[in-house]
Image (spheres, rainbow, N blue to C red):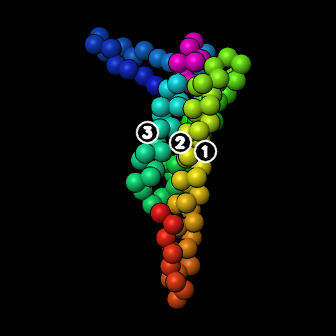
């Protein structure tokens, strides 16, 4: 994903690209994951949570344990939280759908 910013002269400049600034790009991916996860927690669909998981995984490609262990650990924690939330939302949707057939509906969220 390319992130761009508009310059006053109307030119578009690429910032935090994977090739030019890999650690900054990884930080941007982690931050994008945080935003997507927050939005996904507020929605009943899983699309944004899945996008958050993908963003965290992209960040982890640059965050090597030997190079930046703290950033890697924080991103792994964020990934785990997103996956747990995704599982909870998926179970809630499945159980609610099953409940339409006359069973007891249980929400885990």
Which of the two labelled residues, at mark 1 and mark 2, occupies the earlier sequence position? 2
Q: Residues within 10 Å of mark 1 (few under 14, many from 20)?
A: some
Query: Residue 93 location in percent, x, y?
Result: 52, 68
Distance between the alpha carbons at the discs numbered 3 and 2: 8 Å
Q: Residue at x 59, y 58 (%)?
A: 87
Q: Are marks 1 and 2 in contact (CB under 8 Å)?
A: no
**Residue 7: in sight, yes or no?**
yes
Residue 52 disc label: 2
Question: Circle 2 — which element?
Answer: helix
- What kind of secondary structure does the magenta stretch mostly adopt? helix
Q: Does 21 lie within the magenta span?
A: yes
Q: Residue at x 55, y 60 (%)?
A: 88
Which of the two labelled residues, at mark 3 and mark 2, occupies the earlier sequence position? 3
Residue 80 disc label: 1
Q: 75 or 3, which lies in front?
A: 75
Foreground mark, 1 or 2? 1
Q: Residues within 10 Å of mark 3 (few under 14, many from 20)?
A: some
Q: Residue furthest right?
A: 66
Q: 78 or 61, which lies in front?
A: 78
* Quadrant of the image occupied by residue 5: top left
Residue under label 3, please give it. 35
Query: Residue 46 location in percent, x, y?
Result: 52, 55
Q: Residue furthest bottom?
A: 102
Which of the two labelled residues, at mark 3 and mark 1, occupies the earlier sequence position? 3
Q: Is residue 49 above or below residue 73?
A: below
Distance between the alpha carbons at the discs numbered 1 and 2: 11 Å
Question: Circle 3 — which element?
Answer: helix
Query: Residue 42 location in percent, x, y?
Result: 40, 54
Query: Residue 73 location in percent, x, y?
Result: 62, 31
What residue span does the magenta drawing correspond to? 20-26
Distance between the alpha carbons at the discs numbered 3 and 1: 15 Å
């Amino acid at each position: 994903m390319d992130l761009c910013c508009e310059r006053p002269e109307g030119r578009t400049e690429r910032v935090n690209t994977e090739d030019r600034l890999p650690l900054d790009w990884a930080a941007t991916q982690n931050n994008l994951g945080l935003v997507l996860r927050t939005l996904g927690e507020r929605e009943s669909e899983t699309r944004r949570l899945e996008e958050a998981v993908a963003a965290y995984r992209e960040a982890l490609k640059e965050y090597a344990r030997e190079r930046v262990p703290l950033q890697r650990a924080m991103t792994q924690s964020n990934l785990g939280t997103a996956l747990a939330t995704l599982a909870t939302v998926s179970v809630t949707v499945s159980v609610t759908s099953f409940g339409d057939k006359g069973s007891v509906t249980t929400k885990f969220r």
